Amino acid sequence: MNLLKLLPLIFVSFSSFASEQAKIDLYYGTYGDSYKKLIVYPANQDSAVIFVSIDGGPPNYSGSSLFGKATLKNGKLFHSTFRSSNDINLCEFSISLEGDKAITTLLTSDFQCGFFRYSLEGSFNRISKTPEGVVKNIFTEETCSLESIAEQLRITNEVSVHSHHDCMKL
């Protein structure tokens, strides 16, 4: 095949890849407020590490958090995973951007994602375009490096961390 005939195909493929890369970069950052947080942390060209934490504060002081992988598809980030290796409930949701807000839309239920008292679905206001690199469990004070999880994702294409306790093992 003539090389000149292939050049437009190569250019279109590269342009499409560059366009998707630019889109995932738009998601990177920290979102939320004092009771909920979403962090989208860079990992590779088409996926990111995500951390979501929602707590109720006083008087119950209960909450849930989730670590995972989100993949860019059709201009949105999608998360789909089991909460643990022996779980039968698939947790799925998407993240889209509307101005300075990240909007989470559940594709399964809050229960399947480990959020029993509070809903994962909703909007998170952007706090910073720079994602926080370390997150702290508000109940145990354990910290977790999102860069360590991103490195795992780069190597294995998976995120095996499901909790702060799992993260401490990295």
Image (cartoon, grey):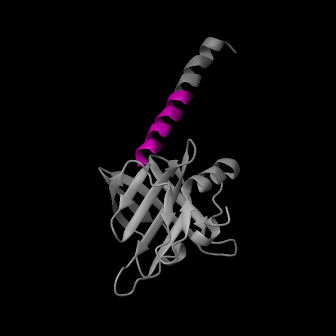
Looking at this view, is 135 or 72 the one in front?
135
Q: Can residue 109 be seen in the rendering of this structure?
A: no
**Is 109 or 51 nearer to us in this picture?**
51
Does 162 appear above or below 72? below
Magenta-tinted stretch: 13-27
Rendered-image quadrant of the C terminus = bottom right
Relative vertical location of residue 111 with respect to residue 131 in this rendering, above or below: below
Is residue 133 in the magenta section? no
- Could you say where residue 161 lies in the image, as x and y percent from the top left? 62, 64
The answer to which of 153 and 137 lies nearer the viewer is 137
Residue at x 62%, y 65% (from the top left corner): 167
151 with respect to 111 (left or right): right
Q: Position of residue 78 (x, y in %)?
A: 51, 56
Q: Position of residue 169 (x, y in %)?
A: 68, 66
Q: Can residue 15 be spotted in the picture?
A: yes
- Going 34% across and 84% down the picture, which residue do you hit? 58
Q: Is residue 52 left or right of residue 129?
A: right
Query: Based on the displayed image, in which of its 4 quarters is residue 55 positioned?
Result: bottom left
Name which residue lies at 33% across and 55% down: 127
Q: Quadrant of the N terminus?
A: top right
Across the whole image, how many numbered discs are drawn on residues?
Answer: 0
- Magenta span: predominant SS is helix
**Magenta region includes residue 19:** yes
